[in-house]
């Protein structure tokens, strides 16, 4: 069976060019219709949503490709979206993927590349132009670095206190002694004592009052 395609592109010349490019593979592809923006696309889908892949431009009037991608995936989750645009900035790439696009290609791609990308998304794969793939890789690297930095900051913020140590601190704030804390947390008084020693060491304090005060200052306890 042929792969059923729709093209959403506001520029008539580019839309015609895309049709001509895809017609080179007419034995395997069927272009069912074209639309000049997201509103027209959604209206046409109401009448005929028997589609496999939509080639989606981004910059369009009335409803752009990013919002259109979101709406199509919400209403017709089985239809694959392949972004085909001149934009390669990080925000648009990230938003398109978040909204459900399976691929992101630049319009400079060859007919063969577009056709191969269509086949890839049909097999539940993801496809991107090489320059876009590099951008995504850099975005992921930046996100991972930021994640690690946040992790380090959170560790410093909490002074690397364990959940149990924070529970002990919370009970110290309430004025409970070792035995009361032990009973509350179902542990032995000696274990409570060990936790408090660790708390003093991590917070760099010398008594319960200082420990509770520092924990409150850094919002470790409330």
Image (spheres, rainbow, N blue to C red):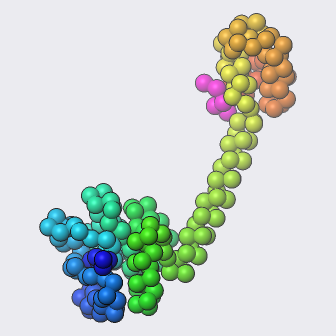
Most foreground residue, 150 or 218: 150
Q: In the image, what residue occupies the spot 33% across and 73% down?
A: 53
Q: Is residue 186 left or right of residue 116?
A: right
Screen quadrant of the C terminus: top right
Residue 191 locus on image (x, y percent): 81, 17
Residue 185 locus on image (x, y percent): 69, 14
State which region is magenta.
217-222
Question: Relative to residue 15, is residue 178 depicted above or below?
Answer: above
Question: Relative to residue 147, is residue 28 depicted above or below?
Answer: below
Residue 93 seen in render: no
Q: In the image, what residue occupies the spot 44% across and 67% down?
A: 124
Q: In the image, what residue occupies the spot 33% across and 84% down?
A: 28
Q: In the image, what residue occupies the spot 70% across and 12% down?
A: 186
Q: Please check the rendered image and state whether residue 221 is part of the magenta-colored stretch, yes or no.
A: yes
Q: Is residue 205 left or right of residue 82?
A: right
Name the image quarter holding residue 1: bottom left
Most foreground residue, 215 or 58: 58
Residue 123 seen in render: yes
Q: Please check the rendered image and state whether residue 111 is part of the magenta-colored stretch, yes or no.
A: no
């Amino acid at each position: 069976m042929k792969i059923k395609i729709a093209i959403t592109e506001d520029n008539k010349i580019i839309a015609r060019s895309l049709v001509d490019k895809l017609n080179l593979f007419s034995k395997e592809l069927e272009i069912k219709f074209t639309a000049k923006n997201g509103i027209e696309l959604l209206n046409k889908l109401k009448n005929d949503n028997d589609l496999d892949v939509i080639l989606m431009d981004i910059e369009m009037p009335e409803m752009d490709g990013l919002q259109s991608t979101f709406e199509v995936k919400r209403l017709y989750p089985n239809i694959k979206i392949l972004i085909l645009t001149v934009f390669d900035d990080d925000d648009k790439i990230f938003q398109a993927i978040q909204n459900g696009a399976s691929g992101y290609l630049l319009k400079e791609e060859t007919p063969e590349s577009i056709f191969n990308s269509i086949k890839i998304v049909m097999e539940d794969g993801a496809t991107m132009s090489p320059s876009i793939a590099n951008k995504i890789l850099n975005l992921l690297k930046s996100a991972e670095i930021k994640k690690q930095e946040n992790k380090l900051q959170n560790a410093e913020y909490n002074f690397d206190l364990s959940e149990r140590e924070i529970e002990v601190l919370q009970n110290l704030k309430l004025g409970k002694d070792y035995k009361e804390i032990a009973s509350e947390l179902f542990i032995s008084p000696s274990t409570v004592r060990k936790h408090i020693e660790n708390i003093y060491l991590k917070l760099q304090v010398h008594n319960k009052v200082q420990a509770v005060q520092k924990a409150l200052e850094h919002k470790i306890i409330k």
